[in-house]
Amino acid sequence: MKEKLPLGERPEVKIVGNAPKELKEGLRKIYATLFGEGHFTDLPEDLYLRVREKEIQKEQLDRDIIRACNDLTNEVLERNGSQSFDIPERNIHILPSEFYHQVHPTMGKVPAATLMERQAIIIDDEIRKKLIEYASSILHEMFHLKGYYAEESSKINGDKNEYTKSKYRLGFMIFSLSKKDRQLKGIHVKSFIGLNEAIVSTFESTHLQELLRRVAVPDMDTKNFPLETSGEDSYVPQKKVFKVIVESIAKAQDMTEEEVINLFYKAHNDGHILGVARLIEKTFGKGFFRFIGTMDKGEKSAGRVMDYLQKQRRLLKRK
Ligand SMILES: [Zn+2]
């Protein structure tokens, strides 16, 4: 088993692209400091000051929930042979609802968000009123934050010595390289968004019960609480697709479903997705891994992938 990294450290963030070595090294170093004293200094100064000023002080229950989420995610990382590391409590920010939506206007109704480039999680204070949803959201975001992360830094066309800085990999998600972005008129394309959320949400729903067991939630009858249907219950169609994928691989490759799910968790955390890709293609046929990559957060694309999966399953059964 790999030893957990000391508090304040995270696995190295890989930087790809054609930017000079020193620049990429600089970016890597920034990430190395984000869990330490340098946390948040990469934010524009005005926003940094406002987050500090407006952040709601955590109570004991908030701290207990954060610690339990940190422990639970680490236990899964360790069990799968991935590098475990702690997310310091101060990297989690509970923000007044209105301000939360100002900091991250694209978040819409999502009650919590992971800011990968800041190695932080922000939470809408509004969701704290519903404790189970609140705890569930932190568990979800923490698994995102412990996912594999890589960026790209490349030279911008022209004479100036300017370089891009953009996401390249995040968990299972793959982002287009900047050269391709230019061809696509600046659109930063992502793939495997749906599968990534399905994996993280599956982790969330299967560990929520255990999380609530570890946290003394006051005035809450967790025993009689319908946990399966609680929480944001996010990404249901994507989770269903993932479930079929897991069941089919387990059957075809003579593995338990838990073993298959753990392979996906591990790939999400280490970034080595090729092994899982091969298993998927062995089970469903060539080209299918790429096809899953087209599944996004919407219901339509999940439905399309599900239709294909069912068809393939029937074909496989006839063999
Ligand atoms: Zn998510």
Image: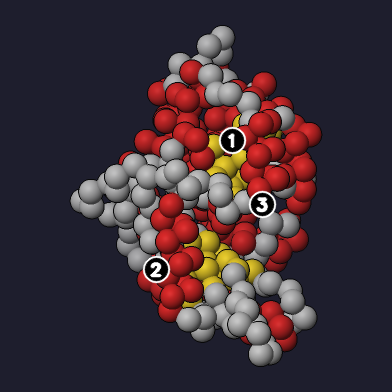
Near-viewer residue (297 or 91):
91
The residue drawn where x is 48% and y is 74% is 23
Location of residue 98 with respect to 12 vertically, above or below: above
Q: Secondary structure at mark 1?
A: strand
Disc sitting over residue 93 in the figure: 1
Query: What residue is shown with label 2?
Result: 272
Near-viewer residue (135 or 88):
88
Location of residue 295 with respect to 127 vertically, above or below: below
Query: In terms of sequence position, does the residue under pointer 3 or pointer 1 come before the other?
Result: 3
Query: What residue is shown with label 3?
Result: 44
Q: Is mark 1 within 8 Å of ligand 1?
A: no
Residue 146 on image: x %, y %:
45, 50
The residue drawn where x is 75% and y is 61% is 300
Which mark lies nearer to you, 1 or 2? 1
Rendered image quadrant of residue 125: top right
Residue 55 on image: x %, y %:
64, 31
